[in-house]
Image (cartoon, rainbow, N blue to C red):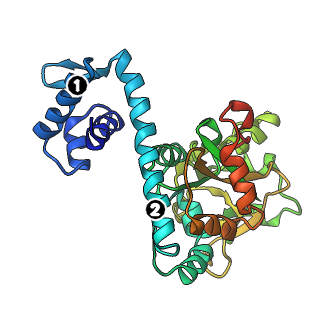
Amino acid sequence: MKLHQLKTIVEVARQDLNLSRAAEALFTSQPGLSKQILQLEDELGVKIFVRSGKRFVAVTEPGLQILEIARRILLEARNMKEVTAEFHQETAGSLTIATTHTQARYALPPVVRQFMKRYPQVHLSLHQGSPKQIAEQVIAGQADLGIATEALDLYSSLAVLPCYEWNRCVVMPPDHPLLALKRLTLEAIAQYPIITYDPAFTGRSTMNKAFEAKGLTPDIVLTAMDADVIKTYVELGLGIGIIANMAYDPKRDRTVRALDASHLFTPNVTRIGVRRSAYLRGYVYDFIEMFAPHLTRATIEEHITAAATPATATAGG
């Protein structure tokens, strides 16, 4: 049994049993990939995948357990490499962060600048995706940290660390009637077409609950994954936008105006997710503390080593 065989079956499962995509991701040929799987199955004496001709159509019952063990082995192998890298060169290496567009565009730039100045030998990568994709990348070891508002708490294998609270504003063209109101209300907002985040992104669940509590059904005519797209369509006059406060900058967003809506919605919490079994390099702890100063190394380690049960997960995501 070899590590590359374990990588092969894990990647096939990750690619929804698509051998062509798995082979491409592993920089190998499809026949070579199939050969590795057959050799592993012969060694273990069980089939990991159910086949229909040359296609994989399902994972067998023992295959599900083998895949889970393989993922743990690969993660521990990665931890071993991180330990030795930390010993040989403390300030060099790599850091991969999976996050949403909003965090990458508005919250992370000053932290990234500070981090790169302190650790010029660390190669930093940002992977953008949905909260679900972010969580899955961290769990699979494809990212060291996940930063999002939604979904991270749904995965018991992640330690979820609260970073900061944020709320919303409503953006609109400069001549919009809402700007004449003394106080913005949900009832007033619901009178106009709304452009806001995709349901899987950036606090949509909290926003929806606020309207539901008032018995209102907002007319959401368009959704997007990031605030820049939302503001673009607001500029075109297609509706008013509901976005994160941090995503509005009056110096840059000169073609729209904003009204604070923090009194209308429950605040959301942006969180960092890390694998509970992960070994974190010293500079990873520093990055987290730069992003959220209250998250000291001791606090982070306490969360990582806590029992991986639903009761330990933090609300929100």
- In the image, farthest residue toward the right: 182
Could you say where residue 9 lies in the image, as x and y percent from the top left? 29, 34
Q: Quadrant of the C terminus?
A: top right
Q: Which residue is mark 1?
A: 43
Q: Which residue is mark 2?
A: 84
State the residue at coordinates (45%, 45%).
75
Residue 12, quarter of the rendered image: top left
Q: Looking at the picture, tell me which residue is in the foreground, 183 or 166.
A: 166
Q: Looking at the picture, tell me which residue is in the foreground, 195 or 182.
A: 195
Label 1 sits on a secondary structure element that is helix
- Horizontally, is 241 left or right of 90 in the view? right
- Horizontally, is 9 left or right of 76 in the view? left
Could you say where residue 101 lies in the image, as x and y percent from the top left? 53, 60
State the residue at coordinates (79%, 33%).
215
Asked if residue 248 can be seen in this view, the reply is yes
Q: CA distance from mark 2 to mark 1?
A: 31 Å
Near mark 1 (Cα within 10 A), the count class, few <14, some 14-19 or many ≥20, is: few
